[in-house]
Image (cartoon, rainbow, N blue to C red):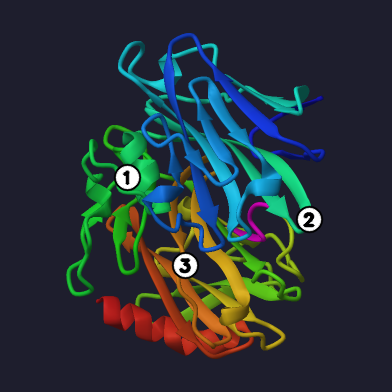
Amino acid sequence: MHSLPKGANAPLPPGPVSVRVTAAAPVDISALLVAATGKVRSDADFVFYNQPTAPGVRYDPAGVDVDPAAVEDAIDKVVVTASLDGRGPTTFGALGGLRMDVAVGGTPVADFTPDGLGPETALLCVEIYRRGAQWKVRAVGQGYANGLGGIATDYGITVDDEPAPVEQAPPTPQAPSVVNLDKGKVSLAKRQTVSLVKTGAPPLRRVAMGLGWDPARGGRSIDLDASAVVIGSRGKKTDSVWFMSKSAFKGALEHSGDNLTGDGDGDDETIQVDLAKLPDDAQAIVFVVNSFQGQKFTEVSRAYCRLVDLDTRAELVRFELTDSEPHTGVIMCVLRRAGAAWTMTAIGEFHDGKTVRAMYGPAEALLRDLG
């Protein structure tokens, strides 16, 4: 049996899968049936006590049962969630005794005990997902401080009994709504901005921008390259990091290296940024992705970027690209100075260009457009 750390995965043998969640106080269990877009197709893909079944998935008060053979082909993964029901502690950090057990055909296969939880009131527990013909389990342990509504917004669910979190209010391109990190992880829509500050906390110092993608189902391997373009105070590119030039500003920016296929779990390429070491003239960092072999983004599935605090390993901000266009480059997001702090804006704007050099002009134009 596998005891999984956060983020790890394990293969599942054939057969019906049961996920059971235990804790020191009662929690509400639910499941999301997630398509290749990273979203549910409709509210019918939300399984919980008032809607206990979907094809291949059944709610149980103690967890979720999944029959992989009966899950529809359009579903890529089943995400098991837990939320506090008001009868015990008010946060997962205070809950205690939290554990997930996964069995196949009654035989234990894996367990997962999340750690590092604090003010979260809802939690992504584990994912039961497919990789080709193989089904696997991934330990997630990602918490949300804004309850089930935060999870719902991320995955496209309508939850009638919880208000939409403030960070999800639709922005306008001319005057995007700006929120901060006080309520926990933020999920951005296009042209939405978050201030990377949390009341009472010191400024962020070291962060990582993780970028990930998969080949579209049935597609060939995708050789995409993540890069970062630094824009100076005059609105011009001053430096960049990419797979052939992995470091800039004496290590203030560091690139993880090239991923040639897009296969595998988690971030495909990562760019670390030591914000405190950047020169004062570095006013913005534009994160872009290019198709080195000329494949179009219509051949790509589930492209995303996420900002992680390297000091706490907490995911702070996520942006998922929910559409695609037949181009070879995309600007995913931008970090910008805002006085002593920084902001992150989701972009999702497509361009043509097989390498980062083709993105210098669009990156400069973006900063002029954002003002």
Say whether residue 158 is left or right of residue 247. Answer: left
Magenta segment? 265-271
The 10 Å Cα crowd at callout 2, few under 14, some 14 to 19, many 20 or more, is: few
**Number of numbered discs:** 3
The 10 Å Cα crowd at callout 1, few under 14, some 14 to 19, many 20 or more, is: some
Considering the numbered disc 1 on the image, is that residue within a helix, a strand or a loop?
loop
Q: Nearer the viewer, residue 148 or 115?
A: 148
Considering the numbered disc 2 on the image, is that residue within a helix, a strand or a loop?
loop
| Rendered residue at 36%/81% (across/down) | 366
Point out which mark residue 197 bears: 1
Which residue is label 2 attached to? 133
Instruction: Find residue 163 and report its horizontal and vertical position in percent.
Output: 21, 41
Instruction: Find residue 124 and report its horizontal and vertical position in percent.
Output: 50, 36
Q: Between tags 3 and 2, which lies in front? A: 2
For residue 325, above or below residue 210: below
Instruction: Find residue 313 and report its horizontal and vertical position in percent.
Output: 55, 39
Q: Please identify the quadrant where the N terminus is shown.
A: top right
Point out which mark residue 321 bears: 3
